Amino acid sequence: MSRVLIVEDEPSILKLLSQNLALRGWDVVVATDGQEGLTQARNMYPDVIMLDLMLPVMSGWVVLKHLAREEILAYVPVIVVTAASREEDERRARGLGAADYLVKPFTITEMLGRISALVPARA
Amino acid sequence: MVVHEQRQFLVNATDATMAWLRLCVVVLTGAALLATGAGVSIESFPWAIVIVVAGYAAFTSLPSTHRYHLPYLTRRFAVILDLTFITLLVLVTGRSESPLIALYMLPLTVMVLQHGIKLGAYYCLGASVLNALIVSWEPSHSPSWLVHLGLLWALFFVLAYQSRSVDTREEKARRRDEFSALQRAAAAPMHMGDISTVTEAVLMGALGPARCCYAAMFLYDERDATFTMCYSLSSDGRFEQEPVHVKPSDILFRVLYTRQPASIPDLSSTRRSRSSILHQAPIVSATLTPMVAPGARSIGVLCLGRVENHRASQHELRFANTLAMQAATAIHTAFLFEEAAGTEAAKEADKLRTQLLGTVSHELRTPITAIQGFASSLKYADELNIPKEMERDWIDEIEANADRLRRLVTDLLDLSRLEAGALRMSLDWQQVDDVIEEQQGNLEILAGGRNLVFQTSPSLPLVRCDGERIGQVLRNLVENAAKFSSAESNLVVGAERFEGGVRVGVLDEGTGIPSEKLDKVFERFYQVEGTEFRPQHGTGLGLAICRNIVEAHGGNIWVESSVGHGSIFYFTLPSPTGRS
């Protein structure tokens, strides 16, 4: 079973992502701010991380930078899930090591497609 | 008129002094004649001479003479007349033995000290030749006249030496002053950006070396072809700036268009200068120089004024011209600075707008994502065998997010209309406690079971307010207070008399706001970072709307808070009659 870490502060979006992925057999871990997200990532070693950029305590950008510096976590693919739709944001996020960039709003099919493209060998 | 002003005439305060001196000469001569008067009858020739000289002296001593008639009486001509009259006096009072030869010394002194060494030398020479002629006709003469002439020349040399050393000293001091004035004008825009400080610095420098008591700058706007502002500085240190209206016939325009400096020795002498705006300034004479900035841009006219009659020398004109050029450059630079600052501000506003747009789009995208996401998830409901409760929950989520979207759009519209001033308040005379009472039901729902207490006093002054809008402020504040405090805490809504109006306060016992964030909470989409709670139903616009509504009533809104103990939001409604 593959494990996904969702870092998102909007309860609705968090519920949407976590329930859909859980129903499809993912092991879901959640965090509601950047600091907690980083701690969870270090503890749980997820197969993929879904990260919002606008987060309280520690922003998604900072989390991305920290993840890139960690020995093992640097290889965990990160999907940035954000409302920031500007191209330069996407370029910057990819420059910081994001594997994919998912702009809100998105459909469930799109989300599932992106995540399975990154983690093909799931349970 | 122009030619009239530009010729070098004997129109000067010092010439009046000369005239007084002439009067003294006449009186002294009369006295001398009376003293030696034996044998000189009243209708004799010497008396006629004295009377003519007295007439001339009296005529030239009147100030109005200098103003209207002296165009024909140049300085050189006056010197010749002085010489002639004194020689005649010498002639009639005893020729070579006359003690009146000493009278030559009085005009000489004034002449050397005030008009320069050259004129003094001519005067001495003339006196010597005339006396030599008188004596040569005399069969027997005493040598005392030679002594007198010797004394005259000695006096001339002493005066010449004196005046030269004074000149050099003054020259040095003036050069120093001029240099520092120019330096000041050049340095003015380096430290201070805005135009009024730059002009003040330049004018302050101009007063010293130009020896004037009034300096002014008339700034010109090339686009409208009018003078816009006048900055003036008097020697008592009073700096004034005022908008001006200058008639097209004014002498200022001539200086500006011809780009030639002008010196007006007496502002009341011609009709044109009398009708000039300069005539309203506390000055008698003025030196005007055009201020031309790089790129041949006309900046305005620099005016240096004095309270006495004065015609500017070539040197003074040159200095005024250089100063005007320097001042023009300084003001031009200040203009450029201001323009640059304007562009900077526009850029900043643009950046803020982009930022706001980003935030708004983010706030809109979140509920849309939830709605779209849950709706598309529901399509797989059968396929994935989703439990009924979860399905129900998702539908609730869709509804809640749609509601959030609706509120956001309403709030955004409200706020933009409030900020544009398009939302009119329908102001009525109201009792604030009536407004609160009206909202009581709504507020209790928003308090969500917290202990809501109302504290109003019955003797509050009437205020003019829009009951519905003030109700909206109250609802927003109570909703906010409930959001950030625990379920069993107290909420208080109170109203009291305050500075002639009414102050309404909403108190909570919630998390509180750090002091450095107190002002920011009223900004759009601002949320205090680090708070655990992320409001599901907040749009981030409530307090911004409150502030706009209260300010539209002429009131203030602010918050007092201590972290961990709670906050009080206050707003005031002024009452025009509440001062009783």
Image (tube, grey):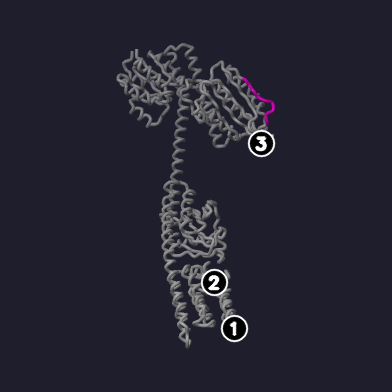
Q: Do labels 2 and 3 share a chain?
A: yes
Query: Looking at the picture, which amino acid does disc 2 mark?
Result: Leu
Percent across and percent down for residue B96 are 49, 82
Q: Give the CA distance from mark 1 to mark 3.
A: 96 Å
Residue wearing tag 3: B576
> Which stretch did the figure color magenta?
B453-461
**Which badge, 1 or 2, comes first in the chain's sequence?**
2
Q: Which residue in the protein does label 2 denote?
A: B21
Decide if residue B467 is in sight here: yes
The residue under label 1 is: B38
Discs 1 and 3 share one subunit: yes
Question: Where residue B409 sits: x, y (%)?
Answer: 52, 29
Specify the farthest residue to the bottom: B139
Res B126 visible: no
Is residue B455 magenta-colored?
A: yes
Q: Which residue is drawn at 42% across and 25% down?
A: A54
User: In terms of secondary structure, where does tag 1 sit?
Assistant: loop
Looking at marks 2 and 3 on the same chain, the residue that comes earlier in the sequence is marked by 2
Disc 3 marks a residue whose amino acid type is Pro
